[in-house]
Amino acid sequence: MPSLVIIDSECANLNSVYRATVKAGLQPVISGHPDEITGAKAIIFPGVGSFTHAAQVLSKKGLDKVIMKVILKEIPFLGICLGMQLLCSESEEAANTAIKGLDLIPGRVKRFPSGLPVPHVGWNRVVPVVDHPLFSGLPAGSYFYFTHSYYVDPCHAEETLARTAYGFSFTSAVFKNNVFGVQFHPEKSGPAGLRLLSNFGKIIAGQRQK
Amino acid sequence: MLAKRIIPCLDVHEGRVVKGTRFINMKDAGDPVKLASYYDCEGADEIVFLDITASIEGRKAILDVVRRTAEAVFIPLTVGGGIDSVELMQELLHCGADKISLNTAALQDPLLIRLGADRFGSQCIIAAIDARRKNITAEGNPAWEVYSHGGRRATGRDAEEWAFEAEKLGAGEILLTSMDADGTREGYDIDLLKAVTGAVDIPVIASGGAGKMEHMLEALTAGGAHAVLAASILHYGTCRISEIKQYLAENGLPVRPVTGNEDYDL
């Protein structure tokens, strides 16, 4: 059984996430197979595109239930961009639909207010609000690459791991036990991004020793 | 606050970089993968490949170039040039491109922007606009006309209006080239930049005319651009990206520092 599975969410950045994860020294496999995902020791959940489309793909494949199941096992789990947003309860992008998120990080995904150039695209600073191994070796305010029009607004402030300023300060990373979500793209963030992925690898290794 | 981006642009023909570069310590300055890696290490914030090949064989070559680059470079990669279908976009994205730049095909069929944005998200779609200054309007304001086919064919479209329409269709960024300034090294067309950045909310990448660092500062401040594209000023070694970034930072602009560990040493 593979140890680290990148969930095949049928999104465009899947291969980039795979290549960066390999470069960061991890040994991932890409899979959309429920058994492989259930048996994984760690999960990366990438995503770009629309919340509605991605949520529908997940539910059509039955992967929403699979993800809930593996998260209950408390294995390390990293959601990237849309993969982070899908951890929340609901999104304004799917406001007029019955489509919901996984509700693991209670909160709402909101569109950036008008007046700001949207999408928020480019390199911006990420400032962790707590000292956490995911950001080990990364100076506070390191630049990461973002490209998104919606951001996560968590209900519980203690689930915010890092913040970023774009007109106002928004949550750019969340965490709850072993579940992490990052709004930026570590796979496209040069050395800083690879360092974060390598840190995630260390969290996985630490978990195994327990 | 978003960092201002410096984006080297490489013209690729049949899988090789053309408009030769003048790097001293590079054995093969025509290899797009090596050049992309070099600029990545130099502190480039993104890389743009402009495929100027017309043939089917050339298409295969760019796919291979994108695939190999994506294995070596972990910053955003944009590909443009002759992309005229969602299928080709899909292929390029699958090979590792992050963004697709649409130009002539979008002018011929504007819905291509919408199709691409709906399928892959706005963040994937850049509307590239080649504009040339035309006579001053009746109100006495400057205006610019959009050209297609690599700047060879006038379209009768107004640049500001086309940028606005492209945004409404779902483009996530505008790559704006001034045909008047391109190749002059006398600076970006600041009036054009002001006009287009005023017409849209999405980020605008300034292109054409960079000859010195002051030009970049001007485009990013007075021009309102979010990023600057540069070719010869970088290829010919007039300035290094680290120097440009230091200069921009000294002038109060946010830039992503060149950390010096871009060799991905973990």
Image (spheres, rainbow, N blue to C red):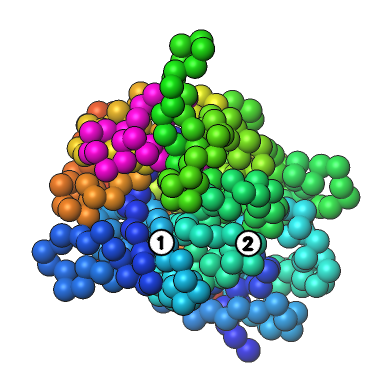
What is the distance, in whole Å, between disc 2 and disc 1 at their CAs? 17 Å
Q: Position of residue B122 (x, y in %)?
A: 61, 48
* Helix, strand or loop at mark 1: loop
What quarter of the picture does the C terminus of chain B occupy? bottom left
What quarter of the picture does the N terminus of chain B occupy? top left
Which residues fall within the magenta stretch?
Answer: B174-195
Q: Does B183 appear in magenta?
A: yes
Please state which of residues A191 and A57 is positioned toward the viewer in this rendering: A57
> Which residue is at a point 44% across and 73% down the rendered structure image?
B58
Label 1: chain letter = B
Tell if the residue under mark 2 belongs to the same chain as the one under mark 1: yes
> Which residue is at a point 44% across and 36% down the rendered structure image?
B131
Please state which of residues A143 and B174 is positioned toward the viewer in this rendering: B174
Q: Which three-letter amino acid code belongs to the residue tagged 1?
A: Ile
* Helix, strand or loop at mark 2: loop
Q: Does A152 appear in magenta?
A: no
Confirm whether residue B218 shows in the render: yes
> Which residue is at a point 36% across and 27% down the rendered structure image?
B190
Label 2: chain letter = B
Please indicate whether residue B250 sits to the left or right of residue B3 in the image.
left
> Which residue is at a point 65% across and 62% down the rendered structure image?
B86
The picture quadrant where one finds residue A103 is bottom right
Identify the residue under disc 2: B85
Identify the residue under disc 1: B52
Q: Which three-letter amino acid code belongs to the residue tagged 2?
A: Ser
Q: Position of residue B121 (x, y in %)?
A: 64, 52
Position of B253 relative to A174 (above/below): above
The picture quadrant where one finds residue B262 is bottom left
Position of B173 relative to B32 (above/below): above
